[in-house]
């Protein structure tokens, strides 16, 4: 008769195994420490982010020299704007400045009392051989000579008046001399008659008649001398008139020069500003990089001032990762934390895991424009060893990256107990 089978030993073995398993797991969960991590989605960025290309003035597109995806170097021309309007305005301004240059030469000569025109050094934009300038110079020379002739005629007329007055003075002076001679003769005759009257040889009326004649001659002499004084005053007035002619000509030239200089400064400033605008007609790349996000596609298109024309992803600047941290995890994030990086755009089997360090944590939350959810930004700097290991990959700004931000070491038991502790902490509370 065979021995009866018993389940005692299998049960004992199973119980011991369960006890050992539970004890081992309990010991492991209490004594083993596991590094925690905050998982956040991020993306690759260049250090200065994408560079927007704009134009401060706007204009009409003449040539488009790049398309999306083209690589450009700093200083390369991207878009060229039409210069017809600006060149036309420049020609007008330079023509006005050339006219001022010629007019100033004429006014300066008039101010200095010169007898001929003299030109100083011409501005660089004035083409002396240009026909318009030559015509202006000829016109100003004719005007200069005409004004000199007019001034000479006025001076000649005044000089003639002076000579006429001087001739009149000479005539009056001769009359004064004649009157004084007559008065002297009558004076002697009066003395003789007075002697005869005293002797009774001549009647008194004869004496009175001579005395009246003497008085008339004296009055006439005074009148003539008064006319001479008036004539001399007239000569002084004419001298002042000559000086006034010269002063008016000089003052008129100075006033016009002052107005011209103000106008010249305004036009010069406009010309400088216009040349600066013309120098900006070629829109160049501020940095080396790759073109994307072009907004201009056709020639003769009109662009407005400060409108984005295209974007450049810099190619000569280091990469970093911008990670979005949930507000509930921000208390565990600080600069200097180690970060494990998974580049999900590449095969996980062949792509090595990268590492980095948090360099910056934003001071306040930002709202995601797409989802409307708040987040904190953490900037992760990729270490040199990881960059060297990833050198064979084409890392492009905008690529997604999974970041595992290492936190404090914790036991498995704390992971299991914490949810229960939080639950009981919130339970049994009245509303």
Image (cartoon, rainbow, N blue to C red):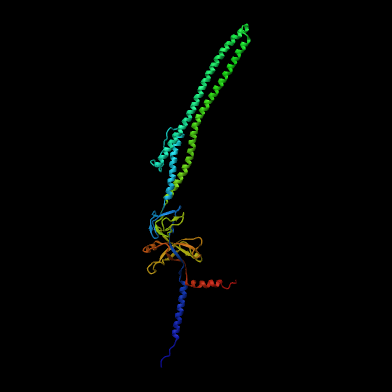
**Is residue 112 visible to the viewer in this orientation of the structure?**
no
Up/down of 258 relative to 303, above or below: above
Along the viewing direction, whichever of 364 and 235 lies nearer the viewer: 235
Up/down of 152 relative to 305, above or below: above
Up/down of 12 relative to 349, above or below: below
Quarter in which the N terminus is drawn = bottom left
On the picture, is 220 further left or further right than 293?
Answer: right
Q: Indicate the quadrant where residue 353 lies.
A: bottom left
Image location of residue 395, percent across then percent down: 39, 63
**Residue located at (49% from left, 28% from top):** 158
Along the viewing direction, whichever of 383 and 64 lies nearer the viewer: 64
Image location of residue 64, percent across then percent down: 40, 56
Along the viewing direction, whichever of 279 and 107 lies nearer the viewer: 107
Image location of residue 305, percent across then percent down: 46, 54
Quarter in which the C terminus is drawn = bottom right
Residue lying farthest bottom? 1
**Residue located at (53% from left, 18% from top):** 175
* Numbered marks: total: 0
Image location of residue 179, percent across then percent down: 55, 16
**Is residue 378 visible to the viewer in this orientation of the structure?**
yes
């Amino acid at each position: 008769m065979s021995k009866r089978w018993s389940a005692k030993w299998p049960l004992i073995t199973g119980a011991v195994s369960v006890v050992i398993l539970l004890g081992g797991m309990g010991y492991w969960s209490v004594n083993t420490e596991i590094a925690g991590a905050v998982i956040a989605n991020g993306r690759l960025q260049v250090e200065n982010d994408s560079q927007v290309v704009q134009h401060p003035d706007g204009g009409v597109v003449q040539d488009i020299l790049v398309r999306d995806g083209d690589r450009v170097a700093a200083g390369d021309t991207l878009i060229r704007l039409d210069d017809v309007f600006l060149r036309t305005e420049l020609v007008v301004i330079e023509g006005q400045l050339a006219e001022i240059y010629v007019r100033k030469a004429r006014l300066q000569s008039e101010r200095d009392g010169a007898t001929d025109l003299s030109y100083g050094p011409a501005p660089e934009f004035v083409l002396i051989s240009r026909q318009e300038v030559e015509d202006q110079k000829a016109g100003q020379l004719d005007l200069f000579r005409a004004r000199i002739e007019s001034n000479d005629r006025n001076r000649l007329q005044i000089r003639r008046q002076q000579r006429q007055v001087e001739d009149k003075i000479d005539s009056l002076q001769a009359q004064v001399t004649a009157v004084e001679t007559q008065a002297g003769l009558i004076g002697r005759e009066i003395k003789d008659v007075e002697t005869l009257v005293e002797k009774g040889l001549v009647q008194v009326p004869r004496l009175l008649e001579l005395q009246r004649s003497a008085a008339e001659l004296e009055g006439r002499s005074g009148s003539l001398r008064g006319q001479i004084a008036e004539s001399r005053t007239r000569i002084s007035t004419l001298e002042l008139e000559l000086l006034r002619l010269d002063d008016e000509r000089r003052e008129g030239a100075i006033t016009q020069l002052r107005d011209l200089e103000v106008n010249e400064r305004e036009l010069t400033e406009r010309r400088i500003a216009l040349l600066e605008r013309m120098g900006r007609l070629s829109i160049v790349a501020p940095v080396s990089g790759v073109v994307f996000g072009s907004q201009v596609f056709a020639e003769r298109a009109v662009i407005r001032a400060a409108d984005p024309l295209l974007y450049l992803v810099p190619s000569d600047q280091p990469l970093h990762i911008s990670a979005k941290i949930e507000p509930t995890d921000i208390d565990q994030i600080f600069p200097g934390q180690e970060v494990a990086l998974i580049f999900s755009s590449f095969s996980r089997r062949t792509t090595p895991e990268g590492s980095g360090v948090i360099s910056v944590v934003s001071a306040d939350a930002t709202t995601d424009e797409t989802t409307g959810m708040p987040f904190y930004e953490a900037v992760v700097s990729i270490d040199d060893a990881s960059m060297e290991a990833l050198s064979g990959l084409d890392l492009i700004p905008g690529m997604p990256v999974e970041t595992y931000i290492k936190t404090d070491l914790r036991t498995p038991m704390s992971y299991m107990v914490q949810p229960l502790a939080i639950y009981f902490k919130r339970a049994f509370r009245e509303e």
